[in-house]
Amino acid sequence: MFGLYGKERRLNTRESAGRILHALTQQESSKKCPKCEDYVLAVRPYRSRGKNLLLTFCTLGIWVVIWWYEMLKYPGWRCNDCGHQL
């Protein structure tokens, strides 16, 4: 009876921390993907404007370069299945 069920793989500390960090730094929603032609899970990176404004102020404007790079590298909502921008 017990042989019918597979053992679940336990996550180590690094994998657990990675999954928690991923969940905290990403927003999820349901949107319609024009490429998949269906409602799918859409994801986008979470950006805290307050944190970025504070860092910009504290670094005398240098953080704007990093903030701008983040916005260009990770733009808006994306389809979780095909990666198409929504």
Image (spheres, grey):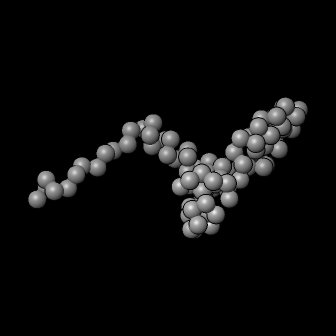
Q: Position of residue 38 (x, y in %)?
A: 56, 68
Picture quarter with the C terminus: bottom right
Say which of 28 and 74 sits in front.
Answer: 74
The residue positioned 29% from the left and 49% from the top of the image is 8
On screen, 46 above or below 11? below
Picture quarter with the N terminus: bottom left
Left or right: residue 85 versus residue 8 is right
The residue positioned 72% from the left and 48% from the top of the image is 75
Q: Position of residue 10 (x, y in %)?
A: 33, 44
Q: Position of residue 29 (x, y in %)?
A: 61, 63
Say which of 7 and 75 sits in front.
Answer: 75
On screen, 11 above or below 61? below
Say which of 6 and 31 sits in front.
Answer: 31
Quick check: can you spot residue 29?
Answer: no
Say which of 58 and 72 sits in front.
Answer: 72
Left or right: residue 17 versus residue 60 is left
Q: Count every numbered label the image shows and give the total.
A: 0
Q: Position of residue 77 (x, y in %)?
A: 67, 56
